[in-house]
Each structure stands twice: as C-alpha cells, then as structure tokens.
Image (cartoon, rainbow, N blue to C red):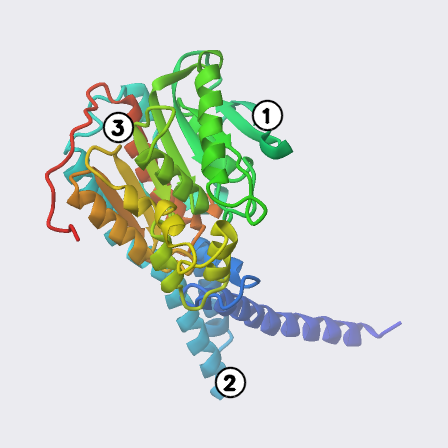
Amino acid sequence: MLPKNNGKKLLLLAAFSVSRFIPRLLSAIGLFFSLWVILPAPTLFLYPLAVGSPEISPWLVGINTIALLLNLLGRPNGKAYIILLICNLCALILSLLPLMQFPAASAAIATQMQAVLGRNYLATVPDADRAQMRSQPFILADSFRGIAMRDVRSDRAIVFANPDGVSLKLNLYRPMQIGKYPAIITIYGGAWQKGNPDYNEEFSRYMAARGYCVVAIDYRHAPKYQFPAQLEDVQAALSYIKNHAADWSIDLDRIALMGRSAGAHLAMLTAYGSSVLPVRAVVNYYGPNDLIRGYNDPPFPDAINVRAVLRAFLGGTPEQLKELYRRASPINYIKPNLPPSLLVYAGRDHIVQAKFGRSLYERLRATGDRAILLEIPWAEHAFDTIFNGPSNQLALYCTERFLAWALKSSDYEFIPLPKTNAAR
C-alpha cells in the first residue's frame, strides 16, 4: 500500500493531467469539426463531415467557447499555449459562421415570399393551422433538444406496383384525427441509385401532425433500371394514390409534389411535364435540373463523381444521348402556368451546385411562373439529414408556410406573375 502522502500526490498529479488534457481534447475536437464548416469534402467517405458540421454549429460554438475559457483559466504562457489559443479563436469564428449568416438569409427569403405570394399570404389559412407552424425560422433550443414530434398514423410498405418483378412500396403518414386532408407526395434522393420511402421520415411525420397526408413513394434504381423507368414509377404511384384517395382521406384537389436531390428531379419532371394527378405546388430541395450542363460542369471537388452518376442513370454521355439528356432535364419543360415552386438549394453544395438552382429560378420567373428561391449560404447537399440543424430549421419554416399557402389557403389562385427579363 502506498503512503497517504504518495496517494495524495498521485491524485493531484492525475487531476492536473486531466485538467490539461480535457481543454486540449475539446480544442482538437472543436477545431477539427469547425474546419468542415468551410472545407469541401474531397471524398464520399468524408462527405458527412462537410454536411453535418454546419448543422451542429451551435454545439461547436459551445465546445469551442468552453475550450477557450478553460485554456484561459490555465494561465497560458509560452508559444504552445499562444498557438492553442489562436486555434481556439479560429475554431470559434468558423463555428459561428452559419449563425452569423442566418439573419440575412432569413430576411431575404421572407421578403421574397411576400413579394411572390403576397404580403399577407397566410391570411386565409385557418388559424388552427397557422398556430401549429414554427414560430421562428431558428430556435436555438431545438438545435440541442431536437424538434418535437407528435403522434401520427403511419402505414408502411404498401405495395403499389411490381414492374419487372420489383416490388415498389409507399409509406403513408396521416394526422391522428379522421378527416379529409391535402397531400404531400415525397420522393427520396440517392443519386437515383439507392434509398427507400423511410428516408427523411422526420419530415413526413412532422407535416402529417400538422394536417397533411404525406405519401413517401418508391422507384426503381439505376444502373439496372435507367431513365425513364423512375418517372414511370412515379406516375404509377400517383395513379395508385388517386385510386385510394377516398380510403386515405386525401383531397385530390390539393396535392403537392416534393423531392430531395434525385427525388426533386423526378418531382419537377412530373409537375412540369405531365401528371396523372393535378399538382398544386412543387417543393424542390437541391434537385438537378439541367443534366447536360451538370455533366459538363461538375463540382470541384467531386466527391460522388457526378458524371459517373449521370451515365449510370441515363446509360451514356450527353454526346452519345443528347436527346435523352434533354428529355430528362426539368429545365427544358418550363413554360407559363406551371404550379408554384419553392426551390431550396445549398450555397456550398458540391453535388448539385447552387448556381443550377439560380438558373432554374431565373427561367421560371422569366416565363411568369411563381417561384421562390431559398439559397442557404453555409449549407451542403442533404443538409436536412440533420433535422434540427439551422439549415433545416430555416427550410422547414419556409416549406410549411409555402405549403400552407398552396394547399390550405381559401383564396389560393393560380395566377402567373409578369415575365421578367431573365429569359435566355
């Protein structure tokens, strides 16, 4: 047994070591993740860091602040400590960037929504529906505790078609109360190669709890099944929904299509082309819309190899299949009197670059169609994977208001806006 004095010395030594180790560990963690707020991911393996770091920025601000205070309390001296403090400050500034950019992005989209939809565009939405919407574009506490979820009725894995022996399924989410509701039909992303209707289920449940029937649909995947198989599957799902609308309490006069990435591409093609159901609104989260331009102008760095993804989806290059690429590009279907569109693009997207969203927006406005562009400067592709992150909080705030205007407003009118000078 050690003498008491030696035991005390060991405890003090251990406490001192821990007191030095914890601040440095927090500093390293904070700096590592904060760097990904601005760094693009060079590989698919690292992509989750670039997507997730801006969305956990409130946590990073807390970690970096604690690390900085602990290091200051340690009475820093010497070059190593000065370097450590500089790293702490840099990490803190980087982690603050999304929150610093948030007010301007929020103000810009609020102004745009009022300009396009009308100054009091929610005035005729029922009070009960407005009361359920998020009160602010960003609620700091939700970043830490999560966005609260309520009970909904859910029916999963409903088979709606079996093309070529592939069982295609859908998930149905409905409010707990029996009634007739507008519907949001969602299409998942995954480079047309993977995914299922369970993707982004938090959004489906959130919207169902606020008075919508949300139907998440499936489609066949590339490269085994190439375009237009996916579009045919979307139409098959819409036909199935149409036939079962009465059973599912769906109001067929109030339908919106929503998709993410590849799913947004299919949603746009359906809504802007031809649909077996009348589409009242389109919500496009970071969807590719000009596939020829996307092939010829890939992002850098290109973590998923965009050109390989497009070849797998379409079966070749634009030089080999120019007409097919044109038919598969939603931007080529823009014409007057399209359903209103909410376009949500990530400013730092290295899969579907934000400039493609801006081009789509300009083309829609040039033909007099109602379109709203929310560009989130700090965000990466698939930002809404972190449902309670700053980016998705802003996108969700705008999306639920846009859909309430389109699907629940009593005086919604499908009137095109005057053409702009953005035509090409």
Residue highlighted by disc 1? 159
Under circle 2, the secondary element is helix
Mark 1 or mark 3, which has the lower sequence index? 1
Residue 111 figure quarter? top left
Q: For mark 3, does the 10 Å Cα neighbourhood hold few (<14), some (14 to 19), or many (20 or more) residues?
A: many
Whole-number angstrom distance, CA of label 1 to CA of label 3: 32 Å
Residue 276 figure quarter? top left
Instruction: Return the residue nearer the eye: 332 or 217.
Output: 332
Residue highlighted by disc 3? 405
Mark 3 or mark 2, which has the lower sequence index? 2
Please name the amino acid that badge 2 sits on: Ala
Residue highlighted by disc 2? 80
Q: Name the spot of residue 169 as percent of width and height, x first.
A: 57, 29
Q: Name the spot of residue 315 as percent of width and height, x first.
A: 50, 53
Q: Name the spot of residue 135 as percent of width and height, x first.
A: 32, 35
Please name the amino acid that badge 1 sits on: Val
